[in-house]
Amino acid sequence: MRAYRDAGLRALVVLGMGDLAWAETVILDETRLGARARDALATDAPPSWEEWEGFARDMVAAHHRPQDGIAIGLGPSGPQRCSEAMLAGCTALARELELCVHIHVLETRMQAETGMRRWGTTLPARLDEIGFLGPEVCFEHAIWLTGDDVARMAGRDVRVAHNPVSNLKLGSGICDVRALRGAGISVGLGTDGASSNDGSDMLACVKTGALLHRGPDTDFESWLGAADLWDMGTCGGAAATPWDGALGQIERGAAADLLLLDLDHRAFTPLHDPLRQTVFTAPAGAITDVFVAGRRVIADGAIAGFDERAMLADARDAGRAVTARFAAADALADELMDAVTAGWRAVAA
């Protein structure tokens, strides 16, 4: 949080949480588990909702200052990773403290099947039954939806974060963005994070999102164009934050959050249509300056107020230290792979 503030960035920091043991959240063939894997799963005990609630309240008290650019949100990781007590508790806490809720819903086919086995209905249907859905909620991914799910989400003003690069990398499926937008649902863009995207380049997500929905069986007149993706990358993203209405546009009364692009860059040479060229050709390197609330935080491509070279050196050292601690987890993952693969194939069939 201190680094975000020092850098002058605006950030909604969502607290990822879950209170069910990992083995309860996936479909796997337990006959393929070895003794060490069984022991590890038997001792997996995530924090309870009561512990998570206390942590969330502490974080809000210490850091939630949306008027100053830093906000806290609640992130029940996915419905299949949460007890109903946690889901209900997040709803109550979010409405009490006026917080955003971000939750990964129907990213994968396995998640859809896990929900059906647990509740006998779709995840959005069950979330609606327990009163979870509302305008403060954003679904990440939203791929394996039914038509009823879409209508239910639209009726509750749920927002969606579309993650095209991550979805392609993980083979999760393709979000039906046209159906969501056609139902009046606000759709923004996300990277889903570097661990499932291999980067955090939002311009790459804008371009990929524009190309992804142009299949050979799709009427070209319904393709998403540059203006659609720019709207998703700006106003659509802002709708899933506490600053909805203040971000995403350049007009009187809006927050002065601005990106400046170099029109002498090769992506704009020659310059025909600035919007289309930004969406389809501009790399992140074409951005020269960034202003957040009127403060210039990147100037001529350099981070203002930080020694970027020293920071990258520190990050390399920290990265080596972190990955060195993963040896035991990697070994356990290898032992779990057969059981998980069998579960995945069962769902796929």
Image (spheres, rainbow, N blue to C red):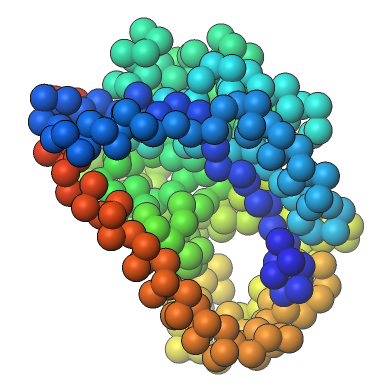
The answer to which quarter of the image holds residue 86 is: top right
Q: Is residue 179 left or right of residue 326?
A: right
Residue 340 or residue 167, whichever sits in front:
340
- In the rendered image, residue 143, in percent from the top left (x then y), is placed at 38, 34
Task: Note whether 12 is above or below 268 in the view shown.
Answer: above
x then y, percent, for residue 194: 43, 61
Residue 308: image quadrant is bottom right
Q: Residue at x 68, y 52 (%)?
A: 12
Q: Which residue corresponds to the image point at 76% horizontal and 56% vertical from the top-left?
A: 70
Give the left or right position of residue 137, taking residue 169 as reference: right
Q: Which quadrant of the rendered structure holds the C terminus?
A: top left
The answer to whether residue 168 is visible is no
- x and y percentages locating residue 68 in the rendered image: 85, 59
Camera-side residue: 47 or 263? 47
Q: How many marks?
A: 0
Visible in this render: residue 119?
yes
Left or right position of 158 against 290: left
**Residue in the foreground of this view, choosing between 125 and 343:** 343
Q: Quadrant of the N terminus?
A: bottom right
Q: Is residue 110 above or below residue 102?
A: above
**Residue at (69, 58) in percent of width and height:** 11
**Above or below, 152 relative to 251:** above
Q: Quadrant of residue 84?
A: top right
Q: Is residue 76 above or below residue 261?
A: above
| Residue 327 in picture, x, y percent from top left | 28, 60
Tell me what residue is drawn at x 42 percent, y 72 percent: 321
